[in-house]
Image (cartoon, rainbow, N blue to C red):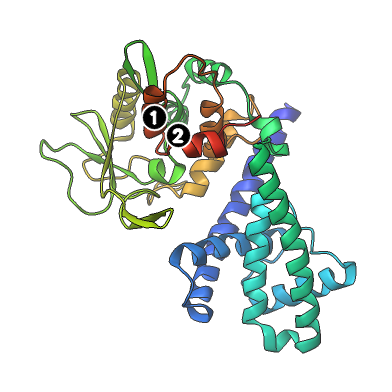
């Protein structure tokens, strides 16, 4: 009973914390729109998210950017090291927080004062360089991080967990759909299963489309029910352009992925149970009033998978998948496998594949 109480308490604590972070993220993103309009939208949101996390873990219960930066500057200079809330977590998280902190410092240069500003920027640069050097070293060696060591279970164990998961309530049915849609959705060709494993933001933003004609060209993501496909118009790799070496390449506006029979069976049960109608979100937020937030989706996913490992998220799932034994699989098949998880063989081998 005490274990159950602790689990409920932990989930409620992290859910409340998540609400704070979501609110702070929105406010910090707006803040960067005002003070750094030159930044890309992606950078504003990234820095907003990291500063929201720093604010929450620094026990700020309201939006106070100046007070936050002054506290962080003073504690960092006093300890001759950046505050622990900035340097917590994986290396990439540390690097992102340092960048966000540096932008916050620059925005408040006059309030910080010339002497402190000079000292803190030097400290930020020194520690930032160390973190980036460590990231580069690990990338070259492709070693697992501390989080990856703990959370990267085997692919077989992950699939077994998903197959054994039983839905005993409406939320359980939602959880079962999330798990199977994200982990156990595949297309089988010549006895090889090509799993479709996308990013949380793509699953969280799914809407239902029941029409015979294709979904509207509105930049939204859909489950197109009758052809049994994921119709992705908004993702990291759709729309806009990307740089490949020195060349600018247009990204496709649309990506289509199959939905396997096992997932469709769960989906049909889910749609009936939750009475989801055409063009409505597949997954709703906590109060059922709007589309689920990707952060809340991740929180649910981690909570479901806790019996396997403490912090399995979508990135870890993709890495687990890429670290399967693919001996004897030719390059063409590997390329098709990479396409189904929406990245290239190069990304798979150089970033996701771990030693």
Residue 269: quadrant of the picture: top left
Q: Which residue matches tag 1?
A: 335
Residue 333: quadrant of the picture: top left
- Which residue is found at the position 66% from the left and 49% from the top? 136
Q: Could you say where residue 257 lies in the image, as x and y percent from the top left? A: 30, 33
Say the numbered circle drawn on residue 199. Answer: none
Q: Is residue 123 left or right of residue 317?
A: right
Q: Is residue 235 left or right of residue 24?
A: left
Mark 1 or mark 2, earlier in chain: 1
Q: Could you say where residue 341 lies in the image, as x and y percent from the top left? A: 41, 34
Residue 85 appears in the rendering:
no
Task: Please determine whether, in this image, residue 278 is positioned above or below residue 318.
Answer: below
Image quadrant in which the C terminus is located: top right
Please name whichever residue, 288 or 342, is drawn nearer the observer in this view of the structure. 342
Mark 1 and mark 2: Cα distance apart in space: 6 Å
- Which residue is found at the position 64% from the left and 51% from the top? 92
- Which residue is found at the position 72% from the left and 61% from the top? 129
Q: Could you say where residue 261 lies in the image, as x and y percent from the top left? A: 30, 19
- As drawn, which residue projects farthest toward the left? 213
Say the numbered circle drawn on residue 345. Answer: 2
Asked if labels 2 and 1 touch by Cβ distance under 8 angstroms, the answer is: yes
Image quadrant in which the N terminus is located: top right
- As drawn, which residue projects farthest toward the top? 191
Look at the numbered disc 2 and give the secondary structure of its residue.
Answer: helix
Residue 20 appears in the rendering:
yes
Task: Please determine whether, in this image, residue 16 is positioned above or below residue 256.
Answer: below
């Amino acid at each position: 009973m005490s274990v159950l109480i602790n689990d409920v308490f932990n989930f409620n604590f992290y859910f409340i914390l998540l609400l704070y972070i979501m609110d702070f993220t929105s406010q910090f993103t707006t803040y960067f729109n005002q003070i750094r309009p030159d930044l890309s939208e992606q950078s504003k949101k990234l820095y907003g998210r990291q500063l929201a996390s720093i604010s929450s873990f620094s026990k700020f219960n309201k939006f106070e950017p100046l007070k936050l930066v002054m506290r962080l500057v003073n504690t960092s200079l006093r300890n001759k090291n950046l505050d622990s809330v900035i340097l917590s977590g994986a290396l990439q998280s540390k690097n992102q927080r340092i960048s966000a902190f540096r932008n916050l410092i620059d925005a408040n240069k006059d309030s910080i004062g010339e002497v402190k500003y000079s000292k803190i920027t030097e400290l930020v640069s020194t520690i930032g360089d160390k973190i980036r050097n460590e990231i580069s070293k690990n990338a070259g060696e492709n070693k697992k991080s501390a989080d990856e060591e703990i959370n990267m279970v085997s692919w077989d164990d992950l699939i077994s967990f998903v197959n054994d998961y039983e839905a005993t309530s409406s939320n359980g049915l939602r959880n079962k759909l999330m798990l199977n849609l994200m982990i156990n959705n595949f297309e089988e060709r010549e006895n090889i299963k090509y799993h479709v494993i996308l990013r949380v933001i793509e699953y969280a933003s799914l809407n239902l489309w029941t029409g015979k004609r294709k979904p509207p060209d509105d930049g939204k993501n859909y489950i197109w029910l009758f052809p049994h496909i994921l119709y992705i118009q908004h993702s990291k790799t759709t729309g806009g352009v990307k740089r490949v070496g020195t060349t600018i390449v247009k990204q496709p506006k649309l990506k289509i992925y199959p939905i396997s029979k096992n997932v469709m069976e769960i989906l049909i049960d889910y749609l009936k149970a939750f009475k989801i109608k055409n063009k409505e979100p597949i997954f709703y937020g906590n109060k059922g009033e709007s589309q689920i937030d990707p952060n809340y989706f991740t929180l649910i996913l981690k909570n479901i998978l806790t019996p396997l490992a403490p912090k399995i998220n979508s990135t870890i799932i993709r890495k687990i998948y890429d670290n399967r034994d693919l001996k004897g699989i030719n390059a063409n098949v590997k390329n098709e496998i990479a396409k189904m998880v929406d990245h290239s063989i190069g990304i798979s081998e150089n970033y996701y594949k771990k030693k």
